[in-house]
Image (tube, rainbow, N blue to C red):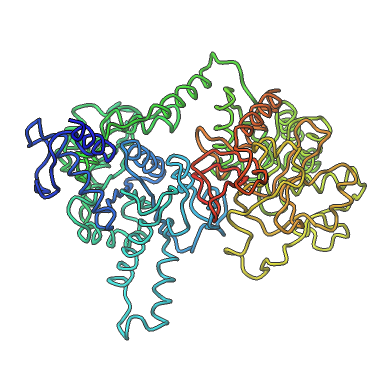
Amino acid sequence: MIETKRKSKLKAQRGEPAGGSYAISDFDSHIHISQLPNSHFDSAKFILQTRQNQERKKGKKMKYVLVTGGVVSGLGKGVTASSIGLLLKSCGFRVTSIKIDPYLNTDAGTMSPFEHGEVFVLDDGGEVDLDLGNYERFLDITLTRDNNITTGKIYQSVINKERRGDYLGKTVQVVPHITDAIQEWIERAAKIPVDGKEGPADICVIELGGTIGDIESMPFIEALGQFSYRVDPGDFCLVHVSLVPVLNVVGEQKTKPTQHSVRGLRGLGLTPNILACRSTMALEENVKQKLCQFCHVPAENIVTLYDVPNIWHIPLLLRDQKAHEAILKELNLLGIARKPDLTEWTARTKVYDMLHDPSFTLQVKIAMVGKYIGLKDSYLSVLKALLHASVGCRKKLIVEWVEASHLEDITAKEDPDTYKAAWNRLKGADGILVPGGFGDRGVQGKILAAKYARESKVPFLGICLGMQIAVIEYARSVLGLHNANTEEFDPQTSNPCVIFMPEGSKTHMGGTMRLGSRRTYFKIPDCKSAKLYGDATFVDERHRHRYEVNPDMISKLEAAGLSFVGRDETGRRMEIVELPSHPFFIGVQFHPEFKSRPGKPSALFSGLIAASCGQLDLLLNKSDHVSKGVANGLNTGKATPKVWQNGNCLKSANGSLNGVYSNGNGVHH
């Protein structure tokens, strides 16, 4: 009896069924668990799970979900792909993502934010499409530059192979050489761990940018058509996002655009398994039946992505329409999936909805002073970071967009009304944020905004260029160096507060900046920034800049009251600046917005929101309380650096704890 209990306990610890003992060979892999007697249900499920785990460990069973778009661009393929990934993750699977951009640029680094939105920066320094930011935020993962495929990257790799002679004298063509390179890249990138765990993920969600029919997408369409047959049956699922417009004249949902889009997709060798239809309202049943008939997609595989208050609703929308079941069925994973657990996501979405209800009056107003405000996607990650922080502080976020050039004297002369309106928006805000940017347009306006924030004691956060202009303003106003400037805008300035970095390139623009995750050490532990990071001794954040604060001017600036509390490992590169006499005046050379997550807001953005609400002391005391929960020492007997842990466990090479703020999945570089 005792021996039986001991065996049962061991089985339970291993996750085996408590009933009879079954070997993996007891059931054939083609038997579905629903076909077995009820008494064998748990045993069969365990067997199938074990086989799936073994196959995944061998690298044989990577599953792929491809998301394409039709009819028009801007339907929300990126949000749809992110939401599908989150939904599958909530079912217990490890998920990774790949974004395919058909443009010829090698990466997004040299693109104008006006044309393509913000450039999202990864830990490894990759400058990528903003959709990868959505993937990281929704899935809480850390992607690599290889997770963004562009036509430029593919052609460059093929040409490099041709120059080396890898093709052995063959004529290099789009088919098969380009298409093979695309498929090999997808398989390689899909295996890269992105969630801090060992081994490849279970499912890779691939988004194909652009619209079906675009000439630049053709090589990728052909490659993905081949890829759908290259992988095993049941390892590939195609989700096609299309438009079902409602014409105001007749008030009827029209399916013809989607029919044409699916017909074009099938003509190119790809057959959609699932239709995700964008519309202003849920699809009517007769419309769904029409799509089912003419697009050859089962009715249960047609979901509606109708208009919702915010994108956090999309995963819930897909779950409610059982999109995960349709996808998992196509991937032969339905038998081992758990019920999707989106409890935290749902609660966060309800808080967001509550904050933005018209009756909710507790709000925080942040003035965003920039030069790209004509396209809000230019500051997408900054907006998301503000949103994450405002939800954390339970405040309705109001963003006041202020065109930096409208604050300048020249605008006062040419357009007094615009000048007055811009200053009214700035002065009516609870806090001021100056994000990064390039070029000298609007710089004087940003300097004036920083001066107003400093003199009026308004909470201020400057990011990258925003930090640099804060230093320039201080040198001009406090040190009396009226011609102080940055070499970026005045190479001949006699008082260069900001200089070109020695390792930078002045001849090549792409990929030559200081990019990716870099370490910042807190020189002054007793400062607001360190406290916001939970009294951490250092922090890893992402960078994107080619100019830096002039280290030769630091002693003068600090003597005048400015404090450079964070520096790199050499101590000569300034990373964080604070004004101790100000309630909240912080500038950072890095971009903290890139690591902000729903439910895990950036520490500095949380500080800005809290300071703007008059709750900074409460937040700092909370951060200090968290840091006191850290172990007090290592086996060496030395004190352990304080750690702010906001993700998975972070370890150094020797396994000891590091004093680092982790605002992502905890991958250590």
Q: Is residue 314 visible?
A: yes
Residue nearest the viewer, comparing 190 with 530: 530
Q: Is residue 39 above or below residue 643?
A: above
Q: Residue furthest right?
A: 480
The vertical placement of 282 against 472, above or below, is: above
623, 406: nearer the viewer: 623
Q: How many marks?
A: 0
Q: Residue visible at 68% across and 29% down?
A: 620
Q: Nearer the viewer, residue 559 or 443?
A: 559
Residue 445 can be seen, yes or no:
no
- Quarter where residue 569 is shown: bottom right
633 or 456: nearer the viewer: 633
Which residue reaches farthest front?
Answer: 2
Q: Is residue 599 left or right of residue 549?
A: left
Q: Position of residue 289 (x, y in %)?
A: 16, 32
State the image coordinates of residue 287 (x, y, percent, origin top left): 21, 31
Look at 64% across and 59% down and name the residue there: 514
Picture coordinates of residue 320 (x, y %)?
A: 29, 28
Q: Residue at x 68, y 27 (%)?
A: 621
